[in-house]
Amino acid sequence: MGNFTVRIRKKARYVDPTACNACGECAKVCPQVRPDEYQMGLSARKAIYIPFPQAVPCSYILDMESCLGNVPIACGKCAEACEQNAINYDDRDEIVTREVGAVIVAVGAEVYDPTQDDEYGYTRFRNVITSMEFERLICAGGPTCGEFVRPSDLQRPKRIGFIQCVGSRNPRLNRPWCSNICCMNTVKDTLLLADHYPDTENVVFYQDIRSFGKGFEDMFQRSKEAGTRYIRGLPGEIVEDPATGNLRVTVENTTAGRIERFELDMVVLSVGVEPPKDLARISGLLTLSKTSDGFFMESHPKLKPVDAPTRGVFFAGFCESPKDIKDSVCQAGAAASRAGALLNAGRIRIEAITSHIDPAACTKCGLCAQVCPYGAIRWKKGEVATVVEAACAGCGACGATCRSGAITMRHYTDDQLNAQVRAILGDRPQDKVCVFACNWCSYAGGDMAGISRMAYPASNRVVRTLCSARVSEEMVLEAFRCGAPVVLVSGCHYADCHYITANRQTVKRVDRLWDRLERLGIRPERLQLEWISAAEGPKFAAVMRRLEDLRRTVTAEEIAHTREALRPKPAARIARAAALQE
Amino acid sequence: MNEPSRNRPNDEELRIGVFVCDCGLNIAGAVDCEAVATFAATLPDVTCVVRNKYTCADPGQNEIKNAIRQHHLNRVVVASCTPRQHEPTFRQCVLDAGLNPYLLEMANLREHCAWVHPHDREAATAKAKDLVAGAVAKARFLQPQEEMVVPVTRRALVIGGGVAGIEAALELADQGHKVTLVEKQPSIGGIMAQLDKTYPTMDCSI
């Protein structure tokens, strides 16, 4: 919080960017040819290459996986050609450590790859391309120097179709979201074609054209005025004519209410975007959570749109939700402003929710140190454990684990939480479901259900803890002792715990409780465990409905038996202690 | 909040104030707030109960501050919306009236009650009473706390060198902060660098 230590792997470039003058002599002599990623594989690069002419840093880089020359005897041509002596085959990755006070996460998105589902014959038909490939083909810096040609015969296509929502708004592909940018990108592409080649016939197949931003509708109208046809309906079928490479497209025009057929020279798939595949890694490192579509979840959808739930972390750009350049720039400014406010203040106030250990009560067992996800508890065998308060985040896993009652969580004490449990179950407990919800995910999921007005039965009573790991066995048993028919422990999704790994303790504890309940003749399913993220309002509501159904199955006899089975037996305890002493 | 707590000793008699918020019709539309307030007055150690139309608005906050002074309250329960939204507001409010901010507890009658039980006033009201009872019971065990203040390292990390990351890094640098920009590709620029022209104006992407 306010102070992060970051270890960065600075990858080896094998070319010193301060010495390289980007003359390109090295690439001329390099014998290794690879597909050029920047050009979407439509042209080739060498093993030593500059990603694109305007690259920053403006320096060549050696793709060591393709290079022959890490044994200089094998090749080494580029090093011979380099007058700057900038090439170093022995360059190695370097670990750089930085202390920072704020982190802006701007990891972007990935473009949907239609290969995986062979969308519209993308893998089979040569003249079906993606909108990213279109960008490279129309660009003066592209593989054809801006001469727009189709792949099959390198001739200029005269009839071009655009298909919208490829990999977007598609529940079948588990991609229900709108990618935001593709409608306007296609409108732009049709205007580019109209400008470069006024004789092309463009047709756009769409579900809805979303031209909601400033200047967007004007652009859409200009595209129509320039002759682009917009057909409401996504093609059902594309067939390639093997002789010509042309594409026969069949589509239901839902505005006209008829089937239409088109013969086109080229089809452009307007592909959507998706969260980057390594998003989970960043999410784990910074304890962030995701929405159901996999983009990052902000602290509040309206009031804290760039703050992450982890203090000192902010979002910018696509990784938070699909957005265009202008919105990315706006959000980046907002994120920088929020981060700047923190850095300018120079100090951060830490909520007084940390753990405290009473040395007199500590039995030196060290269990607390084992469960702390932050390593904030110092303990050596035979010594009293102590808390490093600056490192403690307050999850309460230690407090719930301590068997000797030596640990007090400041502001979420056992006394407070037990009193709350007893009070909410005070009157007619048989009608209620006791819900323990963690602040960051499941309680927030409950808030989301509320904000979204998702009605569910009123039987649940929520007790907020910071983490599900704070819920001790005793708290759950106390709820049952008070007569609760059903108890729910709920937290962040397993890999998304706000306290790194604290909710693993929750799992272990609930497992132990299930065993214990079973031994006591109490139906274990009366204790439920659920992971509900901050974005999962619908899930929260569904769980509450399910728990109410479960509650109705719990009989008065069961509750009476439970209370009896869990009743503390002081007399028995005293007898046992006396027996042990003897 | 760095100065020593201005609270009464812990063994002093508990005096709890409960503030029940209508939130316009957001809560009062589904919950009988008068019944909740009447119920709250019967709870142990509750000294005063006040109903507000909007507790978070200045008049509502002033009522809390006045009640703290008038009734010498040493615990405050605000029964309104989610603490995830207004806990900081009400913590500041009780602090302004001289109370340690950790002597505040909230009951969520809006997101967790009124908004999700709009059609069963009786059940929603019963639940609201329980939530208030839970908050009051918890409040009886609250203790004043002192927050720790730690220095913030004046340097930022930006992960990702696409248009958003570049812009954020430049903006922070313009504010005078040291920034480390991390990009996994050999060049910054991201997806935007691969585009030819960009909408709505037709300028080049690089």
Image (spheres, grey):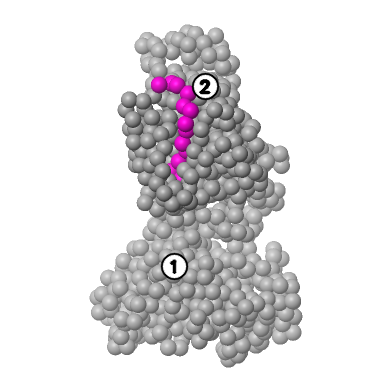
Query: Which of the 4 image quadrants contains residue B166?
Result: top right
**Disc 1: which chain?**
A
Q: Magenta includes A146?
A: no
**Callout 1: 10 Å neighbours few (<14), some, many (20+)?**
many
Which contiguous range is marked in magenta? A153-166
Q: Residue A540 carries which label?
A: 1
**Callout 2: 10 Å neighbours few (<14), some, many (20+)?**
some
Is residue A49 visible in the rendered structure shown here? yes
Vertical arrangement, residue A69 with respect to residue A94, above or below: above
x and y percent of residue B78 in the render?
62, 77
Query: Which of the 4 image quadrants contains residue A425?
Result: bottom left
**In the displayed structure, does residue B120 sit left or right of residue A54?**
left
Vertical arrangement, residue A452 with respect to residue A132, above or below: below
Residue at the spot of label 2:
A147
Q: Which of the two residues, B29 or B82, is positioned nearer the viewer here?
A: B29
Residue type at tag 1: Phe
Task: Check disc 1 and report its element: helix, strand or loop.
Answer: helix
